[in-house]
Image (cartoon, coloured by chain):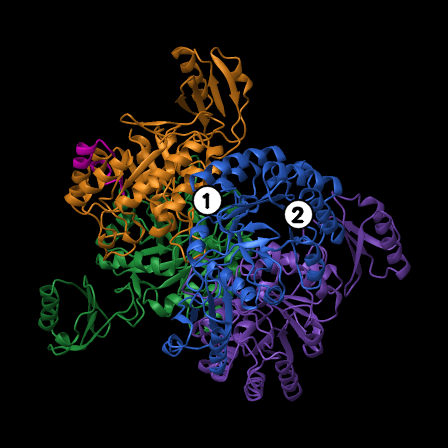
Chain colours: A purple, B green, C orange, D blue
Amino acid sequence: MLVVMKPHATEAEIEAVVDRIRSLGFTPHPIPGAQRVAIGVTGNKGSIDTAQFETMPGVADAIRVSQPFKLVSREVKEEDTVIDVGGVPLGGNALAIMAGPCSVESREQILETAHAVKAAGARFLRGGAFKPRTSPYEFQGLAEEGLKLLALAREQTGLKVVTEVMDSETLPMVSDYADVLQIGARNMQNFSLMKQLGRIRKPVLLKRGPSATIKEWLMAAEYVVAGGNYQVALCERGIRTFETMTRNTLDLNAVPVLKALTHLPVVVDPSHGIGLRAHVAAMARAGIAAGADGVIVEVHPRPDRALSDGQQSLTPREFEDLMKQVRVIAGALGRAV
Amino acid sequence: MLVVMKPHATEAEIEAVVDRIRSLGFTPHPIPGAQRVAIGVTGNKGSIDTAQFETMPGVADAIRVSQPFKLVSREVKEEDTVIDVGGVPLGGNALAIMAGPCSVESREQILETAHAVKAAGARFLRGGAFKPRTSPYEFQGLAEEGLKLLALAREQTGLKVVTEVMDSETLPMVSDYADVLQIGARNMQNFSLMKQLGRIRKPVLLKRGPSATIKEWLMAAEYVVAGGNYQVALCERGIRTFETMTRNTLDLNAVPVLKALTHLPVVVDPSHGIGLRAHVAAMARAGIAAGADGVIVEVHPRPDRALSDGQQSLTPREFEDLMKQVRVIAGALGRAV
Amino acid sequence: MLVVMKPHATEAEIEAVVDRIRSLGFTPHPIPGAQRVAIGVTGNKGSIDTAQFETMPGVADAIRVSQPFKLVSREVKEEDTVIDVGGVPLGGNALAIMAGPCSVESREQILETAHAVKAAGARFLRGGAFKPRTSPYEFQGLAEEGLKLLALAREQTGLKVVTEVMDSETLPMVSDYADVLQIGARNMQNFSLMKQLGRIRKPVLLKRGPSATIKEWLMAAEYVVAGGNYQVALCERGIRTFETMTRNTLDLNAVPVLKALTHLPVVVDPSHGIGLRAHVAAMARAGIAAGADGVIVEVHPRPDRALSDGQQSLTPREFEDLMKQVRVIAGALGRAV
Amino acid sequence: MLVVMKPHATEAEIEAVVDRIRSLGFTPHPIPGAQRVAIGVTGNKGSIDTAQFETMPGVADAIRVSQPFKLVSREVKEEDTVIDVGGVPLGGNALAIMAGPCSVESREQILETAHAVKAAGARFLRGGAFKPRTSPYEFQGLAEEGLKLLALAREQTGLKVVTEVMDSETLPMVSDYADVLQIGARNMQNFSLMKQLGRIRKPVLLKRGPSATIKEWLMAAEYVVAGGNYQVALCERGIRTFETMTRNTLDLNAVPVLKALTHLPVVVDPSHGIGLRAHVAAMARAGIAAGADGVIVEVHPRPDRALSDGQQSLTPREFEDLMKQVRVIAGALGRAV
């Protein structure tokens, strides 16, 4: 259930509703909005009588939420969530453009890439310092050294840093450097980590698990939001299917479906999604055309020498060309870059 | 192997190459192109010595084809195939827009729809007279009565008719009425039917099987082309995955992959692909942005009363709106509608 | 709905029920059973009032059928269907053991195999004369010559012949030679063919499509049975998943699920299912342990020289060893071989 | 590469090989076997010259390992790994039978279940104290209270305790109570956790991720073993496919494939695999027939009142019946229970 307060409801009125919910043995989740406060209710089995709330002072409406995901649902919050990443919006009308290498490899590599993607129009720099790798014998990332290089690139360019956190042990360290915490696909249902992300106040970019249904993905986001961290964006990065010609199957169907179901921003990762450099631009264009709120693209100055994911990384020049096309398509849909 | 003739090679020179191929026990497939003739060679095990052809008069080049699909491959024919459907192109720079109801239901229904989609910019009218249905107890189509109604709609509007053929028994009848023969997803590997389609001279729109790999799909097209019918277009209509929120998973990754591998036109079916009316337009836009040569969209004057697929059919008004967006995105990619 | 007649209901009483069903505009399907006749009713939308049938003479019960598949459902016929293949049972307590090469290749090959699998305990000989192949350039089978060789092997061994029919054109010819008509996975939703199989009186072994749900598979069988041919057995042969180490994923989960939902016999094909010779025996054993009514196994005297599927064919010796294990497991479940 | 020492190689000879490997810049992994010591080598790119090792004193052979997984491979260790769980074997000829409720719910529930499954023949008690749940609003387990109840059940019955650990924070606590640490499917590629499991000395039961390939699964096990913990068993628990009639698709094909590729024990979880109580026994039988080294089965005294997974839990009586069948099938394969 969701209790929607009137636009000018007082703090005391809100508090009274919260108390009533608690007295019934349920859990209240106040959700501040641009216009008004709403209070999500969870913990009930079966439906709650809405009438007892509708007559309370300051209450505009009490509505049942039909989906298993509640706080991330559009039923609960109709307007799009726009995450403020230190002045740069993630979500809303302007597209969020994120670009950079798969892994941070060296000072020269990350700085060269950062300046190039900034010049082409990116506002966020991606780059991994902790790398989840299928094999224990592969390059696992530069760790804190990589985070420091990302911070240096931010200092020089003003780009916001998006980087992956793999576990709770390194969460404090990564949070110190990152502007947006990326959660990798294989960790999407690492519920212990989701709960910890709920307790901090840092934007989260939650990648879809390779075999996660849209519903499971929204439930994972619900873990973070239910913990109190409302700054969550979703990133479609390809699902696992029977097709072997592409690395994954970028599921663009998820984009319009998510935009209808949730108020959270939706970003598309064409690089992991299709996994083939020649086709990344086509999928990035398609993602924007499908209604995504942003793209995250792997860019490397010398893809053939990359320590990871070189086969799917664009050169800075290819990225620049892509950005021109993205701008036109965004314009056709009434959006800015 | 492929033997590429010089632009002004004579008939006699071509014939000599064909004879040489036959004398080696292989099968020649002459493929006329805009600039020059090429001759595909199949039936060999292991590679053929190309040198013996390169020195023949009129031969420009003899090249090995690495893919299991040969005649449909870009290695064999670099330029895009443009199918001439009675004056309307399918393939090439101009997008092929196909629209109409899932099933032909009545004279009024098909005529109303045909005029509406024509006004909005479609050049092809889709509509099923023979319907493959999961259950034997569901509506199976109007059969020849439906074909006659499609012909009537063509007469009134000039739209080209795209309609499904399900078996060899009805192939002659459907061919009499159709401009383009649609092959349904479940028949993609009905090899007996593929062979028969190779013997006729009618454009074929070959839908991807719900669990067909891109390679299997191209091999199915190869059956038709190897039989001598070069007028084949491919239609991505969604694959089967674990996701249950959408009817299928429209695999737009297939679009750029196919455009690189084959010279055949690629059409996208967002209606079956996502299966949810609210999201068909988003997927149609995305398909065009990914590089498709056309879209095929279900349109019904009263979707809620449709005998099949009402939940994924656009109203004529919604289709009109979609066409406006498609025109802008096509323009951004340098294509006409 | 299903109208169940009393054990000794007269022909006239049965006829009266059939007439009443027709007079309501529905279609009656009389289903003879060992103890009594039941009459399936299809063609209704919404539920039918059962009371009007329950009071008719000779009627024991009138029950609603909740599944979309009706005539193949256990709700409609509780006892197992046992198909009498010229004196050899397919279904029921005794396991049906089918074995033989993927393709009939020569007189010597098929006769040698037939004698060997007969000696090891098989009652059915499998072998393809018409082969559906992904590529038009691969071996397509010996056609009628292959059917004649199968008939010769039957003459010499008494084994019943199971062979694939690919299309309606060759259906009469294949029916002349075969004891059981095998329908390949890719043809499972070839509805035109299903309808034709409903009109003949020959046992059908219906393979599961590589991405067919259990429900779709039962609906395909329903096409055949609704046409009047009750002699249908189902064959699980592996579904398509993301796993690439095995050719397909033999879905043994389907075995107990089917045995609960339908009265039709269920056979398992471990050869196509896992596609790796070394592991065929393990999957055959597992299929029997899961409750299958039979197995169909590829056996070839010289697998490494087979024209198709050699990598998944057992030698006669390996098949003999497998049969010993199968007998013990069958015994543990109270079944005979 | 793997260096195999002679049966009576001295400590000094082994040490010399280890030193040589290190001096080349690679990492040595000594693997003690029943007959002899082998030393895995990782960290090399490209192949190493084996000759330089073959001539060293005490070396029997130096062999190249072709698979990306090394230490878990049968190429490296031919004989089956048998994990000694406090005197009870996991792996080897005797089947490991694990049973118990999904979640520990109360003292009465776990004790009643433990005594019942012990009486029926189980040697391991399963039960979750920390539960990964799709929704943050579902029952999350009794935590340490649940672990204490498991320890109490062990004390009373002698059963070994198998229980899930979800994260590194609770790893020390769970290790204090558990005999075998279960890693849930969604954590299979939680590489931080895998690395930590490599550092402890406690048997690990590693469930397959719902969309993990067999290769990825073995690579996850490789993380643990490469860290120094050789006590890893694999648990097939169903993969995600398009089929919706079963909860998951228990992939029994993985059993013979794994038994060929790895020396680690393989356990099957039919409860999660098929997810339907009526069919759990069939899949357990099939798993044993396919060659699994054990089964893990959910048993609950009153499944319809279970706080989780009731729909797939057997009653103690059903489990007892299953064990009788398992004994016969095990006997047919020459194995003990």
Of C213 and B263, nearer the camera is C213
In this rendering, the answer to whether B236 lies above or below A202 is: above
Count of picture labels: 2
Q: Quadrant of residue A237?
A: bottom right
According to the picture, the residue beneath numbered tag 1 turns out to be: C213
According to the picture, the residue beneath numbered tag 2 turns out to be: D127
- The amino acid sitting under disc 1 is Thr
- Between the C-alphas of marks 2 and 1, the distance is 33 Å
Of B106 and A158, nearer the camera is A158
In this rendering, the answer to whether C229 lies above or below C279 is: above
Q: Quadrant of residue A30?
A: bottom right
Position of residue A11 in the picture relative to residue C84 (left or right)? right
User: What x and y, as percent, mark residue B337?
Assistant: 42, 67
User: What x and y, as percent, mark residue C115?
Assistant: 21, 38
Position of residue D222 in the picture relative to residue A14 (left or right)? left
User: What x and y, as percent, mark residue D310?
Assistant: 64, 40
SS at mark 2 in the image: loop
**Numbered disc 2: what chain?**
D
In this rendering, the answer to whether C232 lies above or below D229 is: above
Residue A37 sits inside the magenta stretch: no
At horizontal 64% and vertical 71% (from top left) the residue drawn is: A165
User: What x and y, as percent, mark residue C64?
Assistant: 53, 26
Can the viewer see residue D157 in this picture? yes
- The amino acid sitting under disc 2 is Gly
Magenta segment boundaries in residue numbering: C151-173
